[in-house]
Image: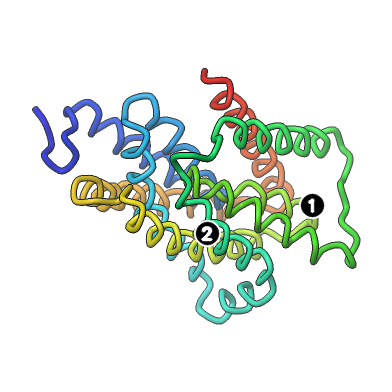
Amino acid sequence: MEFVMAGLPAHAFWAAIAVTLFAGFVKGAIGFAMPLIMVSAFSSFLPPELALAGLILPTLITNLSQAFRQGVWPAVASARKYYRYLIGTVVFIVVSAQFVHVLPQTALLLALGVLITAFVLYQLSGLRLAIAPNWRGPVEWLAGVLGGLYGGVSGIWGPPLIVYLLAIDTEKLESIRVQGVVFLIGAVVLTSAHLQSGVLNGSSLPFSAFLVLPAALGMRIGYAVQDRLDQKRFRRWTQILLLLTGLNLLRRAAGL
């Protein structure tokens, strides 16, 4: 049995739904990692471009929910506060998406995986990497550029932002809202960019749209968990999830 929308056998289609449901749950609980979980799992049973296309619309819709969960004005305030990261992300998603077929993805994933893993292990050891107030602007610009560069190529632009938010010890609700705002704007740009690049097309677009349903359901369940996490547990689970993100990037770079 095949599904005409993407030419997928039934087992691959239902596997994609299960992965998306779990990814939505994690995003609802902690605020990030949906694209990472989806593209990492999808790559084992979907063609690379279909794996990237599949995560685009679920990411767009769930970030819309996350960004505006506390209302419009808190989201606007977060966008203003973190405008440097937003600009860097948007510009470099547009740029790098056009070179998705030629940029050295393995080298990019290896570099980001090493940096993220080292940062989290440093923090989990009990040490803190504090960023002085006068350095926050330049560091935020750098994080935005890195996020956009990786986002256009792989659909994953969250890790540099999470590292930055952990480094400045952002409070739970603001951290999740900021992630939603940044990821939403990045998702809009990514969707537009890959409509241009051809990754989203007549075959892959319906598949991506269908995956919005399990993503939204998983996120709703995850919200219930998020509401029960205090700041300390939220920070610890964020660090653990970010460490897994770094290790997974290293795994992908190694071709495992």
Tell me residue 113's x, y (percent).
66, 33
Q: Vertical placement of 201 versus 248: above or below?
A: below
Residue at position x 66%, y 58% in the image: 144
Tell me residue 220's x, y (percent).
40, 54
Please state which of residues 226 and 64 is positioned toward the viewer in this rendering: 64
Q: Residue furthest front?
A: 102
Name the residue tied to disc 1.
167
Q: How many marks?
A: 2
Marked residue nearer the N-terminal end (2 or 1): 1
Question: Alpha carbon of mark 2 to alpha carbon of mark 1: how far?
Answer: 19 Å
Q: Vertical placement of 157 versus 101: above or below?
A: below
Q: Vertical placement of 5 versus 86: above or below?
A: above
Q: Residue furthest left?
A: 1
Q: Please, what secondary structure does the residue beneath circle 1 have?
A: helix
**Quarter of image, res 135:** bottom right
Task: Specify the amino acid type for callout 1.
Answer: Ala
Label 2: few (<14), some or many (≥20) within 10 Å? many
Residue at position x 49%, y 42% in the image: 154
Name the residue tied to disc 2.
183
**Quarter of image, res 172:** bottom right
Residue at position x 79%, y 52% in the image: 167
Tell me residue 204's x, y (percent).
25, 46
The chosen color scheme is: rainbow
Residue 61 in sight in this render: no
Q: Residue furthest bottom?
A: 73
Q: Please, what secondary structure does the residue beneath circle 2 have?
A: helix
